[in-house]
Each structure stands twice: as C-alpha cells, then as structure tokens.
C-alpha cells in the first residue's frame, strides 16, 4: 500500500512538473507563470476557475484569451492574415500532413461535424494549420486537406510565422527525430478550436471529442450569435 501511495505521489509530481514546464514554454508575453500554470491545468482537466465562461466545449479560465493575429500562407500559395477570415467562424486544428494517427482522426472528426451542421456549415471554415512547415508546402497541404473536406483549407508559412500562430493558440509542438527511420515526427498538442468572427477562440475541444459534440457546440454558438 505504501508503495502504491509513493507511486501515485511520484506520478502527480511528474504531471505537475510537466504542466509547469509546458506553461513556461507556451505562456504569452506579459502573462505571469502562475497564471499560465493555472490555465494549463484548467485545459488539462477540463475545468476553469470560478467565473470562467462556459463556451460549449472546455471552459477557458477567466482572462485567458486564445487566437488573434497571424500571417500565414494558404494551400494556393496566397499570403493570408486573420483579416481574410474576419466575420467568419472557423474550426482550427494544428497538426501536419505526415502525422500517422491523431491528425487524420481529428480532421475526419472536424469534417463530419461540418457535414452534420447542414446550412449552418456555410458560415464555418474548417482549417488545418501545419506545425511542420519544413515539409508541408502549399501543394502538399492542398492535396492533404482535400481528402477530408472540399471546404477545408490548409495554412503554412515560415517557421517563425507558424511558431507565432501556435503561440497565440497556446499550441505545444516539438520535433522528434527517429534514428531508425532517418526521418522525424512532430509531437504536439491536439485540441480543436472554434474561432469566432473576431478571431478569438470561443470553444476548445479535447482530442477524441465526437463530431456530434463539436457540431452541437458550434450550433449553439452560431445560433446565439445570429440572435444577438
């Protein structure tokens, strides 16, 4: 029994230590480390401090703002910014085309959620933002996103542009070399973001959220916005 308690305590220490390190790496300019740590804990456990707004997916801690300005390149090779999507809603996922498992699964979920929305889907832009710009050229993205949904767009850019966009969404990513294969994978967080017409994240969905759950949350947000 004592051994089990020690093991659980060790796991808790490792979890908190990893979350603290993640908060340190991904905190926004001007955000205190304590606030960043609290925010990452909230994302991890799907809760928010008292007063956090219930946005239909995970609750975002009060004062935590995700999204905002970016400059990237779409799958046609055109430079785009957040202003090109002003007034439209987006479902955004950060991943990459060489991803072996989770990215295709999440993009398939997004596509299914969009299809289930019916006419409301016309107000929504599904998007993949690559975290592997070295390999994900516009042409590579164009071929990849077309396999999931005809309206899905792909966004890439310079490593600096991609890193800045990921920072604004608090996305973690890191290159993992595979010596036995001679290539690499990208380790990354895997949330789906519902972005409002103002470019700010309104809802956040955990990995493996169902298409029905995402569609229901999107429907609530779009219907509420239309009635405002």
Image (cartoon, grey):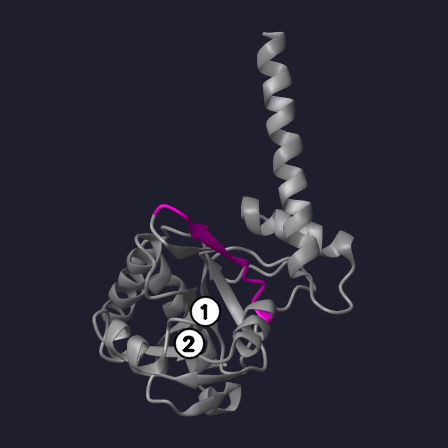
Residue bearing the label numbered 1: 194
Distance (Cα) linking label 2 and label 1: 6 Å
Residue 141 in picture, x, y percent from top left:
32, 76
Query: Residue, x 45% and y 74% (percent of image)?
Result: 224
Q: Quadrant of the N terminus?
A: top right
Nearer-N-terminus badge (2/1)? 2
Taking 139 as reference, is 91 left or right? right
Neighbor class of circle 1 (other Cα within 10 Å; few <14, some 14-19, many 20+) is many
Residue 118 in the image: x percent, y percent? 23, 74
Whether residue 47 appears in magenta in the rendering, the answer is no
Front residue of this view, candidates 217 and 161: 161
Q: Which mark is residue 73?
A: none
Which element carries disc 1, helix, strand or loop? Answer: strand
Instruction: In this rendered view, identify the residue nearer to me: 149 or 138.
Output: 138
Left or right side of 209 for 142: left
Residue density around tag 2, few if under 14, some if 14–19, many if 20 or more, within 10 Å: many
Q: Position of residue 142 (x, y in %)?
A: 28, 79
216 is higher (above) or lower (below) than 209: below
Helix, strand or loop at mark 2 = strand
Q: Nearer the viewer, residue 50 or 199?
A: 199
The residue located at (74%, 55%) in the rendering is 35
Q: Which residues are magenta?
A: 168-180
- State which quadrant residue 219 falls in: bottom left
Residue that mark 2 sits on: 90
Task: Say which residue appears at 66% left-offset and 64% top-offset.
Answer: 64
Is residue 150 at all visible to an observer of this figure?
Answer: yes
Asked whether disc 2 touches disc 1, contact meaning CB atoms under 8 Å apart, the reply is yes
- Judge left or right: residue 7 versus residue 217: right
């Amino acid at each position: 029994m004592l051994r089990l308690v020690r093991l659980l305590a060790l796991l808790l220490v490792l979890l908190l230590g990893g979350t603290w390190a993640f908060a340190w790496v991904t905190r926004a300019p001007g955000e205190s480390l304590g606030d960043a740590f609290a925010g990452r804990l909230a994302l991890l456990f799907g809760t928010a401090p008292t007063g956090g707004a219930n946005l239909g997916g995970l609750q975002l801690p009060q004062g935590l703002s995700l999204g905002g300005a970016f400059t990237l390149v779409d799958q046609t090779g055109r430079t785009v910014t957040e202003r090109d999507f002003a007034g439209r809603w987006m479902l955004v996922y950060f991943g990459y085309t060489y991803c072996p498992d989770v990215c295709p699964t999440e993009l398939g979920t997004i596509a299914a959620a969009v299809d289930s929305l019916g006419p409301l889907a016309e107000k929504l832009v599904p998007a993949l933002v690559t975290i592997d710009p070295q390999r994900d050229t516009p042409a590579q993205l164009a071929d990849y996103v077309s396999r999931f949904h005809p309206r899905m767009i792909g966004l890439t850019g310079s490593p600096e542009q991609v890193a800045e966009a990921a920072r604004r969404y608090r996305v973690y990513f890191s290159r993992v070399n595979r010596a036995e294969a001679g290539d690499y994978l990208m380790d990354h967080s895997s949330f789906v973001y519902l972005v409002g017409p103002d470019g700010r994240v309104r809802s956040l969905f955990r990995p493996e959220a169902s298409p029905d759950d995402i569609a229901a949350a999107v429907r609530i947000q779009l219907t509420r916005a239309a009635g405002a």
